[in-house]
Amino acid sequence: MSIKVVIAEDEPLMRERLLGMLATAWPEAQVVAAPENGIDAWDAFLEHAPQVVFLDIRMPGMSGLEVAARIGRQAHIVFVTAYDQYAVDAFDAGAVDYLLKPLQPGRLERALARLRDKLERPPGDVSAVVRQLAAVQPKREKLKWLKATIGKQIRLIDVDEVLFFQADSKYTRVVLAGSEALVRIALKELTGGLDPDRFWQIHRGTLVNVSAIRAAERIDAERMQVLLRGSSEVLPVSRSFTHLFRE
Amino acid sequence: MWAGIAKWYRDWDQELQSLLLQPELAAAMAPGWRRKMGVKIALLTPVERQEMYRFQVTYRGAALWRALASLCLVFSVTGALLKLAYLPALPMSLALLGANGVGFAMLMAMITVWFNHASYARPGRRIITGVLGVILLGTVYGAAVAVLFKDGSWQSFRDLLPKVLTYTGIAMLVLIALPGFLLATVRNRHYDLLASQLTQQAEQERLARELSETRLRLLRAQIEPHFLFNTLGAVQQLAEQGAPRAAELTAHLIDFLRASMSDMRCEQVPLRAEFRLVESYLRVMQVRMGTRLQVRLSLPAALESTPVPCMILLTLAENAIKHGIEPALHGGDIAVLAEDCGDVLRLQVVDSGVGMSATPGNGTGLQNIRERLRLSYGDAASLALSEAEPGLAVEILIPRKTNA
C-alpha cells in the first residue's frame, strides 16, 4: 500500500536530495507534491490530504511551524532543519520527528523506521511544541488591510470586517456584510498573512472569519456546512475540516 | 620602640600608595583617622592622585628629609644675606628663624594653592575677602607683638596699626598672593593638560576595547552553522549526482571561508577583497537557491584598492538574502555596487525582496556596521536604508580622503 507524502523544502538541491533518498529508503512512499514554500505546502496538503508531510522549518510564505500549526493532527509531520539546537531540544522533549540537514542515510533510515511504526496510529499532537517554538521566532506581520479595486475606486478593507474569503482562480472574493470585492491575490497567498485562530480554513477554497460563524450543520454522515451572520450564503465544509466543529 | 615606629610609618606609607592607585580600597578600611584620610584621598581627582603618587614615590623616606633640609638651607642663606644687606641691627638667629618661618609659610601656601588651584585662579569675592582677612589678621597680630615689645599701651598700638598694616599688606601681596596667583594660573593650564591627557587615554582604551569586541562579535556572527550545513548538504547532493557543479560550489565555499577567516583579523581591506568575499558568498547562495536568486556586482577598476572596513558589504549581502530574498515567495535579485562620488565612496546593496515592513530581525548587523563606521570615520561616514520598489536599498557613504 502506498503512502502519500508531501515534501516541502525551499532549496532545490535539498529537495532533490530528500526525494532521492526517500525513493531508495522508503519505496512505499509516493511523493504527491514537493512544494518550495510554506503557502504551496499548505495548498498541497489541502489538495492531496497526505499521510506524511516533511516540513523545512525555514521557508518563505509560511514557515514549517506555521504550516504544521494549520495541519494539526491531520497528518504525520516530520520537521527538517539544518541547525537549530533550540528546535532540536524541543523536538526531542516533545517526541516530535525531525531530520537534520545535511541528510545522512543512517539517520534517515532510523527516522523512517520510527515513522512507519507511528503510521499504524493516528497522528500525534505537535501543536504544543510548535507553539513553543513559534513564540521565539520573529513574528510575521499579520495582514490588517486589503486593497480592492471596484470600478475606478480603490477600496481599503479592514481584514477584521471580512466575513469570508473565497478562491476564484487567481483572484480572491472578499465578502463583507452587505458588500463584496475581488482582490488580485490568490487565496493561498493571503492565507499566510491571516491569523489561523481568527480565520478558519473550512475548505481548500474558503477561509471564514470565526466570529462570523452562526452555526455549523450536518448534511449527512460526512458533510457539513456553515451558516453565517451578516450573509445568507451557506459555505460547505470539506471532510478534512469537519474536525474543527466536533464538540 | 624605634623599629615599631619605623614599621608603622612604612605600613602607612604603603597604604597611602595603594590608596592612590586604587581609591576604592578606602571603603574597606578599618574606621579611624587613617580611614578618614583614605576617604579624602578617594575624593581627589584622578590627576591629583596621579601627582600625589608621583610625589610620594620620588620623595619617600630619606629623600623627603633631604629635600626639606635643602629648602631649609636655601631659606637660611637668603635670610642671612638679607640681614647683612638691609637689617644690620637684627640678631642673626632671629633673621634665620624669620627667614625659615616665612619660607615654609610660603611653601605651605603654595601647596594649598596647588591643590585648590581652581578657586585661586578664578578672581572672585571669596578670594579677595580671604586675602584681606589674612592681611588684617597678620596686621593685628604684628601690631600687637610690636606694642608688647615697646610699651604695651593702647595708644601706641593704634599709632602703629597703619604702618604695620601697610607692611603686612605689601609682604602678603609680594610673598603669598602674587606668587599664589601665578602658580595657580600655571597649575590650571598644567592640570587641564593632564586631565585632557587622561581623558584621551581613557577614550583610546575604550576604542581599543570596542574594536576587539566588534571583532569578536563578527567572529561569532559570521559563519552561521545554518549556512554551513545547508551548503554542505547542497555539495553532497551535487556530488552524489556527479554534477561538475559540486566542484564549483566547493570552490566558492572555500573562497568564502578563506576570505572571511583572514578578513576577521584585519580592520580594513581593499574593496577588491571585500567584493571577492561577497561574490563567493552570493555564488554559493545562487547554487543553493537556484532560479530564485539573481546577482549583479559592479566595482569600477579605479576603486579596487580603496580601503573599506572589512565585512560590511558581506553583512549587508547576508541581510539582503536572509531578510529580503529568502522570505520572498518568488525570490529576487541582489545588486552590490561601488561608485566613486568625488570625496566619498558610495557602496550600495539593493535587493528586490520583501522590503523593510516584512523584515523581522533585531538589526544587530546594521547596528554593528554603524558602530564600526563611527569608530573609523566619526560622523563623516553614513549608512542609510530606503525602500526600493520592491525591496530594500542600503547605502553606505565613506569619505575617501581619510584613507588616501
Image (cartoon, coloured by chain):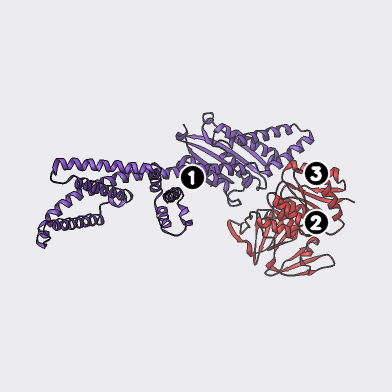
Chain colours: A red, B purple
Q: Which residue is mark 3?
A: A19
Expressed as whole percent of the image width and height from the top left, the position of residue B202 reads 45, 45
The residues bearing labels 1 and 3 have C-alpha atoms spaced at a distance of 54 Å
Tag 2, which chain? A
Does residue A204 show up?
no
Looking at the image, do the residues carrying marks 1 and 3 touch, with CB atoms under 8 Å apart?
no
Q: Which residue is mark 1?
A: B206
Q: Which residue is mark 2?
A: A75
Mark in the foreground, 2 or 1? 1
Q: Amino acid at mark 2?
A: Ala
Q: Amino acid at mark 3?
A: Leu
Q: Name which residue lies at 49% across and 38% down.
A: B398
CA neighbours of label 2 inside 10 A, class few (<14), some (14 to 19), many (20+): many
Expressed as whole percent of the image width and height from the top left, the position of residue B195 reads 38, 45
A221 relative to A91 in the view: left or right:
right
A227 relative to B123 in the view: left or right:
right
The residues bearing labels 3 and 2 have C-alpha atoms spaced at a distance of 19 Å
